Image (cartoon, rainbow, N blue to C red):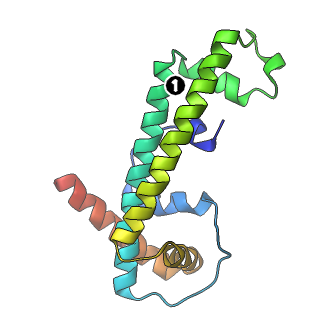
Amino acid sequence: MTPWAETRAQETSAPSTLAQTENAPQDTPPTSTTVSEAELEQFAHALVQVKIVEQRAILSILEEIKRQGFSEERFNAIVSAPSPESLNPPLTTAEQEKLTAINAQVEAIEAQALTQMTQAVVNQGLTYERYQAILATVRQQPELKERAQQLVTEIVGQLREN
């Protein structure tokens, strides 16, 4: 089961959006780089759009889990069990078939989300590599992180007004 399926849907809140990126895996090692105000604004807009795509993907995955007939409790028990043999009640053949169907859907949802997230970054005038470099810099520099959080808060506020 992928990490997407294990993640619970939460409403994106502006102050925590950047904090959530603290635990996100990094594809590039953290390096300090100069970030202009314009780039920081592009980054903040892209980050908000990436988080929206992530949340929609999580909701789609949760909907698929429910569509397959799993309760949240049973699904969580299955994916967190150290082995299928340790489940009580045991994993049924029907549940295994449903899990296979869920995995196929999750892979499709994740692929679509990745495409949409990449497009969100590109639409803001950044490359994926530059987005990652800015993210690493924001993580390292508290004053830059604070400014990015302010921008994200403003953007989310504008989105909520519309």
Q: Residue at x 46, y 76 (%)?
A: 127
Write down the residue under mark 1: 65
Q: Residue at x 57, y 25 (%)?
A: 101
Q: Is residue 71 above or below residue 53?
A: above
67 or 135, nearer to the observer: 67
User: In this orientation, does residue 112 appear?
Assistant: yes
Would you identify the image quadrant in which residue 21 lies? bottom right
User: In this orientation, does residue 10 appear?
Assistant: no
Residue 150, how many percent across, how many down? 36, 71
For numbered disc 1, what is the local secondary structure? helix
Residue 63, how many percent across, how many down? 44, 28
Question: Is 40 on the left or on the right of 27, as rendered?
Answer: left
Question: Is 21 on the left or on the right of 63, as rendered?
Answer: right
Counting the numbered discs, the total is 1
Question: Is 105 on the left or on the right of 82, as rendered?
Answer: left
Q: Is residue 74 above or below residue 33?
A: above
**Residue type, label 1:** Ile
Q: Is residue 148 above or below residue 73?
A: below
Q: Residues within 10 Å of mark 1 (few under 14, many from 20)?
A: many
Would you identify the image quadrant in which residue 47 lies? bottom left
Q: Residue at x 55, y 17 (%)?
A: 70
The quarter in which the C terminus is drawn is bottom left
Q: Is residue 17 above or below residue 74?
A: below
